[in-house]
Image: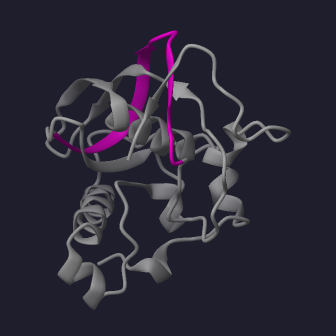
């Protein structure tokens, strides 16, 4: 079981590496890692389990965050209508995205960042993601709102990008042109 002590923090070199593609079909070790990523995210959202194991709540986790430089992510998040997007993917890719932008009005956080980093993080308002699930099947997911932001955040981790790399350093709360603010 992954706990907070397994999650590496900003400054660790693995977080800045471009993660390697997972060789498919995935090995048992890679499948187990991906299952544990998903288990952590789900457990972190359960008040009793997260309190018992001292987990910080999260909606996504990428393998580089547990010092495994491979292209694997787990996302477990609901959209504004309560629809659940729960995906554990090998080699996820954004295959298309909108020109329109969006951002979280409250800013983003990260399980690998123990400090508050204020500012708006511009993201694509809509993305289509392809990846391979634990059963070895290709999935294609169309996303908008918070799920789209979560997937972009986790896929950034696979490319050595931290969320605060996107924040305007001079004016962190600069209005993002033609962007949808996603409230939380």
Q: Inspect this view and state whether residue 146 appears.
A: yes
Q: Nearer the viewer, residue 154 or 139?
A: 154
Q: Quadrant of the N terminus?
A: bottom left
> Is 23 on the left or on the right of 156, as rendered?
left
Snapshot quadrant of residue 36: bottom left
User: Residue 109 at what x, y percent from top left?
Assistant: 53, 56
Residue at figure coordinates x 80%, y 37% from the top left: 171
Toward the bottom, the furthest residue is: 52
> Is 98 on the left or on the right of 33, as rendered?
right
Q: Inspect this view and state whether residue 68 appears.
A: no
- In the image, residue 66 above or below residue 2: above
Snapshot quadrant of residue 173: top right
> Is 51 on the left or on the right of 66, as rendered?
left
Which stretch is magenta?
84-106
- In the image, residue 124 above or below residue 100: below
Q: Is residue 96 magenta?
A: yes
Toward the top, the furthest residue is: 99
User: Residue 175 at what x, y percent from top left?
Assistant: 66, 27
Q: Nearer the viewer, residue 85 or 183?
A: 183
Residue at figure coordinates x 67%, y 47% from the top left: 164
Q: Is residue 9 magenta?
A: no
User: Residue 45 at what x, y percent from top left?
Assistant: 25, 66
Q: Nearer the viewer, residue 157 or 125?
A: 125
Snapshot quadrant of residue 51: bottom left
- In the image, residue 79 above or below residue 179: below
Residue at figure coordinates x 22%, y 76% from the top left: 47
Residue at figure coordinates x 30%, y 42% from the top left: 89
């Amino acid at each position: 079981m992954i706990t907070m002590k397994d999650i590496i923090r900003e400054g660790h070199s693995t977080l800045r590496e471009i993660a390697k593609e997972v060789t498919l079909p995935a090995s048992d070790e890679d499948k187990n890692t991906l299952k544990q990523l998903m288990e952590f995210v789900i457990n972190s959202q359960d008040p009793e389990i997260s309190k018992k194991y001292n987990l910080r709540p999260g909606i996504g986790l990428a393998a580089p965050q547990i010092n495994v430089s491979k292209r694997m992510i787990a996302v477990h998040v609901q959209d504004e209508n309560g629809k659940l997007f729960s995906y554990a993917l090998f080699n996820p890719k954004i295959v298309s995205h909108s020109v329109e932008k969006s951002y979280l009005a409250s800013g983003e956080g990260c399980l690998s960042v123990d400090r508050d980093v204020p500012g708006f993080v511009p993201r694509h308002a809509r993305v289509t993601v392809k990846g391979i699930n634990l059963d070895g099947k290709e999935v294609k997911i169309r996303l908008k709102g918070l799920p789209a932001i979560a997937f972009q955040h986790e896929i950034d981790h696979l490319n050595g990008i931290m969320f605060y790399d996107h924040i305007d350093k001079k004016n962190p709360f600069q209005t993002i042109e033609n962007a949808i603010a996603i409230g939380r």
